[in-house]
Image (cartoon, rainbow, N blue to C red):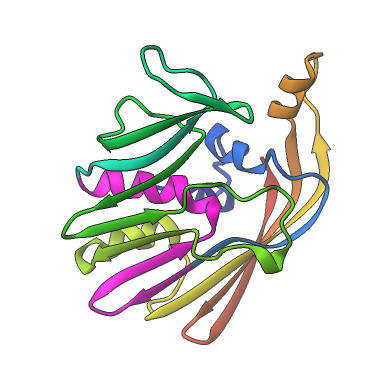
Amino acid sequence: MESTLRKIFENKADEDAHRYFVRFGKGEYRGRFLLSFRKSQKIKVYGSFEWANDFVKLANELKTLKFSGKVLMKDKIAGKEGKKKAGVFVYEIESSLLSEYENAYHYLLDANDSEIVLKIKKALPKPGKSEAKIDDKFCSLELDLKYWQQVREAFFWDVPECKKVEISHTLQINEIVMPKGIDDPEEIRRLAKRKGKIIRKVNADGKEIVKEADLLV
């Protein structure tokens, strides 16, 4: 699995990556996409809310799991009872394999077995929170060591071998690129792209590594 940010750093941003940036206007945003891990007898990975979907997707790829919690969808699912709130449909699920909830706007789910434990908080933070208030443990994954290579490929592909890592990202959005030939304000908002830079700061066992990439997503 390739995480959202790996796609961006490797110039493979897609629609799934794009929707993470719709909430951002022009400006500089520090302390975003916070990510960390500790490796001992288990792998423990923590992330801010932006990582919740990627955590669920990776866990679901690694093993057949049953998920419980909330799934937020932009469109109503036929035959399913969901509450509409703030422009999305909220579905409460219990012991689900997620086959009916693909391409969710947001997964706020837990899963638990002998090799993988996933925990995600059940309410999205409000837009505009300052750097100091961002929860760096909004979601967590605890995994058996045998999954380290898959975890590394998804989230820590550019990190040297180490036992402890903390990563933060700064978004510098210089321009909003509007779609052409569209009049509907909601569609314009959904399709407009953010142009600028993303700066990735990695602290691996006390050693700092900084890299940046152009952002057009």
Q: Is residue 217 above or below residue 91?
A: below
Left or right: where does residue 166 sit relative to residue 154? right
Left or right: where does residue 203 sit relative to residue 102? right
Residue depicted at 58% across the width and 76% down the height? 209
Q: Is residue 40 rendered magenta in the image?
A: yes
Q: Quadrant of the C terminus?
A: top right
Name of the residue lying farthest toward the bottom: 206
Residue depicted at 19% across the width and 55% down the height? 113
Question: Residue 180: image x %, image y %?
Answer: 80, 19
Please name whichever residue, 202 or 57, is drawn nearer the observer in this view of the structure.
57
Question: Residue 105: image x %, image y %?
Answer: 52, 34
Q: Is residue 119 above or below residue 209?
A: above
Q: Is residue 45 above or below residue 190?
A: below
Question: Residue 25: image x %, image y %?
Answer: 79, 44
Question: Residue 104: image x %, image y %?
Answer: 46, 32
Residue depicted at 40% across the width and 12% down the height? 78
Name of the residue lying farthest toward the left: 114
Q: Report the magenta residues as a range.
A: 36-63
Residue depicted at 67% across the width and 48% down the height? 126
Residue 197 in which image quadrant:
bottom right
